[in-house]
Every structure is written in C-alpha cells, then in structure tokens.
C-alpha cells in the first residue's frame, strides 16, 4: 500500500481569507505542492481516471496548471502544452476570449501545438465559474484536438464551473470540494 493513500489532500490546501479582495476565500495549493507525499498523491489521483486512456498531450492553464500538468504529463508518458495569458507565448498563437467579473480576458496557445485529432487532457488547480476552463476547451477545439477530459485539484461547486464544462461534453475529474465558495 502506498503512503500517499492515507493523505487527505483537502487538509493540505491553505485557505487565505479576503484574497485577492474582500469576501474571497482563496484556496492556495502551494502548501499541497510543498508536501512531497501530498504532491505525489495529488498527481496519482489526477491521473487515475485517465491512466488507461490514449492521451498524447496534457494542456495546462497558466500558472498552477503548468506545475500540475507537467507532472501529470510525465506520469502519463506524454507531452505538455501550455495555455497562457495573451502575449506570453513567443511563437504564433491563437486566442480565445472569456469573461471575467469585470471585463474580458484572452488565453492563447501556439497554433502548431496540437495535431488534428490529437487526444489531450486539460489540467488546472481549481475550477470555479469555469470561464477559463471553458475558454481552454474552446481553444483546444479550435485546433481540432480530441479533448479527452479535464482534471482539477479543487472544485468550488457553488460557482458552477463543472456544469459549464459538462455542457461541452467534457468528462471532468476533481479531487477535493470546498462548498460555499
């Protein structure tokens, strides 16, 4: 039996009240990432439902999705592709708009990052309203990727993000839930 089986990942997530603004309970995974066995357990659990699936690339959303996505890609023996904020990629990129609380933002991916039909798993640390994840799925589909699913460490179910992705027929996997956020 693995030592990672007995770890409660939720206990390793730090909550920071009123960040980045009053009324927000920020769920900080840096405490989970710094716990060696917790990080290992997290990656094992993110990979578990997809381990027997054909996945050629993991796409991680900036920034914590890079850390998790890179580790998941390594575990799945596949490549990694970053999805970044507008203007951060050095090569020719395509973008996808998404709504923020007060405005519009854009995420981008290199236009040659994915081959048509290539199976891709989307990874990020947290799903809240689902706006960024939905934009990432749309971006991957613009490149005609086969989006196998999406994996997140944390779900904030009261904000409806998973429902948004499921409307796009995306299989979703989360590890811990924080209600009321």
Image (spheres, helix red, strand yellow):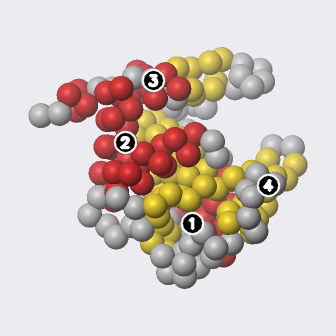
Cα–Cα gap, marks 3 and 2: 13 Å
**Dot 1: what SS?**
helix
- Of residue 66 and residue 16, the one placed in the foreground of this image is 66
**Dot 4: what SS?**
loop
Relative to 159, residue 97 above or below: below
Residue in the picture at 56% in, 52% down = 60
Quadrant for residue 96, please give it. Answer: bottom right
Q: Are marks 1 and 4 in contact (CB under 8 Å)?
A: no
Residue in the picture at 31% in, 27% down = 37
Q: Are marks 3 and 2 in contact (CB under 8 Å)?
A: no
First in residue order: circle 3 vs circle 2: 3
Residue 157 visible somewhere in the drawing: no
Quadrant for residue 175, please give it. Answer: top left
First in residue order: circle 1 vs circle 3: 3
- Of residue 162 and residue 74, the one placed in the foreground of this image is 74
Which residue lies under the disc numbered 4? 86
- How packed is label 4: few (under 14 Cα within 10 Å), some, or many (20 or more)? some
Which residue lies under the disc numbered 2? 43
> x and y percent of residue 32 in the render?
45, 26
- How packed is label 1: few (under 14 Cα within 10 Å), some, or many (20 or more)? few
Residue in the picture at 49% in, 22% down = 31
Q: Is 179 displayed left or right of 140 in the figure?
A: left
Cα–Cα gap, marks 4 and 2: 28 Å
Q: Is 128 displayed left or right of 55 in the figure?
A: right
- In the displayed orientation, state which residue is furthest to the left: 1
The quadrant of the rendering that contains the C terminus is top right
> x and y percent of residue 148 in the render?
44, 67
Quadrant for residue 36, please give it. Answer: top left
In front of the other: label 1 or label 4? 4
Circle on res. 167: 1
Which residue lies under the disc numbered 3? 34
Circle on res. 42: none
């Amino acid at each position: 039996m693995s030592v990672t089986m007995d770890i409660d990942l939720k206990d390793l997530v730090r909550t920071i009240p009123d960040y980045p603004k009053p009324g927000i309970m920020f769920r900080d995974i840096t405490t989970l990432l710094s716990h060696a066995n917790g990080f290992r357990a997290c990656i094992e659990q993110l990979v578990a439902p997809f381990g027997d699936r054909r996945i050629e690339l993991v796409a991680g959303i900036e920034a914590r999705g890079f850390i998790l996505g890179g580790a998941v890609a390594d575990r799945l023996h596949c490549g990694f592709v970053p999805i970044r904020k507008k203007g951060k990629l050095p090569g020719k990129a395509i973008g996808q708009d998404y709504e923020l609380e007060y405005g519009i933002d854009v995420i981008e991916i290199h236009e040659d990052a994915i081959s048509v039909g290539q199976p891709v798993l989307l990874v990020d640390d947290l799903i809240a309203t689902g706006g960024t994840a939905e934009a990432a799925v749309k971006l991957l589909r613009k490149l005609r990727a086969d989006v196998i699913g999406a994996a997140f460490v944390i779900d904030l179910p009261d904000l409806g993000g998973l429902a948004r992705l499921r409307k796009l027929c995306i299989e979703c996997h989360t590890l811990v839930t924080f209600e009321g956020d």
